[in-house]
Each structure stands twice: as structure tokens, then as C-alpha cells.
Amino acid sequence: MLTTPNVRPSRALRIVLRRRQSGVVLLIALIAVAILAIGTVAVFRSSDAALFNAGNLAFKRDMTNRGELGIVAAKTALTSGALNLEATRQSNQPASGYYATMQATDKHGIPNNLVALTTEVANTKINGGDGITVYYMIDRLCTAVGSTDPANACVVSSIGSAKGGTVLPYRGQAQPPSVPVYRISVRVDGPRSSQTFLQTTVSL
């Protein structure tokens, strides 16, 4: 009967095998550490980007809120300030940033005078605080100065235009006068050359 001899590896062979195994483990550990380091850097960069975007959104919202100061000031000028009389609004009022005719705009619908910050617009400067400056301008949506006569092709609000059918609220009564539309445009200048533009329309 043949028996297999009990052959044990020599001490030198065992040392070589152990060294080979240790080298493989070290390589795997280094790869794992590198992957973890890359993942950690990616997480930090993603977090920084999220915080940066959140800060920009908050800054933009704050500038929009400050722009409301310009809209309020323009409405006050039209209703109880220097522009509260219809006769006054029939001509340009440079000191109040007011134009009796529709002004040219850029491709975004922002009046060129507001973008260029002309002298008339600069007269409406408002300190918004925290390094923010607000400007506004008002232009009447008519093609010519003077009254709101149809010849001036003024844009009028729906309350002043005739409606037909049974929906006419003034049926059997005198029609209300045409009410011209005024466009209020606001520019907000903030820190780091940031800008925000707002627009609204009112009828008087």
C-alpha cells in the first residue's frame, strides 16, 4: 500500500508565500483608501455647490424684495406725489423719471433708458441699504404726448374699453373714460455688479 509522504513546505517557502499575500492585501487596502478619498472630495464639492446655489437664490430674492421699494415709490408719485395730476402726466417729467410716451426697450422688454441709467432715471435713486441701490422709471404707453385721445394710440386698461353682450357692467349707463396704462420699470444694483430688473403696470 502506497502512502503519501507528509511533505511540509520549507520555512523559506512559507516566508515567500506570506510576503506575496501581504502585498496583495496592501494593494487592495490602498485602492479602497483612494476610492474613499475620492468619494469624500466629491461629497464636499457637492455640498459646497449646494450652499453656493442656495446663497445665490437668497441673494436674488433679497434684491427682488428691495426692488419693491421702487415700485412703491413710483405708485406714490403717480397717486399722491409729483405726478398725481392728469395734466402733469401728459408731458415728460424728467425730474420724476417720467415719460409721457412709450420708451424703446431691449430684447428683454427693459427700457433702454433704465439700462443706460440716463439722467432722468438717475433722479429716482433710492438707497435700498446693504450696498443696494434702486432706480425706477415710468412711461405712459402712448405714442405721443398730450391727452389720452385715441389719436395718440394709448394703451388703455380693460376697465375703460367697451365690452359687448350681457357681460357689460355699464349697460344702460354712461361708459367710463379710457384709463391709460403706465409701465413701471425698476432696476436694482447690488454688490459684486449684480442687477435685477422688475416691471409692473398700473392704470389711473
Image (cartoon, rainbow, N blue to C red):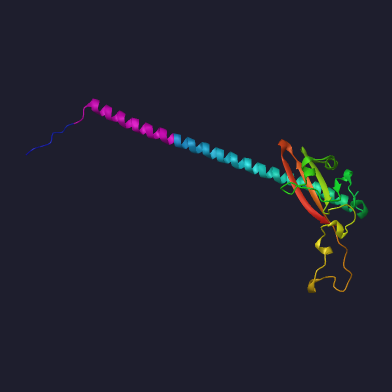
Q: Is residue 10 left or right of residue 52?
A: left
Rendering coords of residue 9 (x, y %): 21, 30
* Nearer to me, 147 or 13: 147
Q: Does the magenta stretch mainly form a helix, a strand or a loop? A: helix
The magenta-colored residue range is: 8-33
Rendering coords of residue 68 (x, y %): 78, 48
- In the rendered image, the residue lying farthest to the left is 1
* Nearer to me, 154 or 129: 154
- Vertical relation: 118 (above or below) 74: above
Rendering coords of residue 168 (x, y %): 81, 71
Measuring 70% from the left and 42% from the top, which residue is drawn there?
59
- In the rendered image, the residue lying farthest to the top is 12
Magenta stretch containing residue 12, yes or no? yes
Magenta stretch containing residue 60, yes or no? no
Rendering coords of residue 4 (x, y %): 12, 36
Measuring 85% from the left and 48% from the top, which residue is drawn there?
99
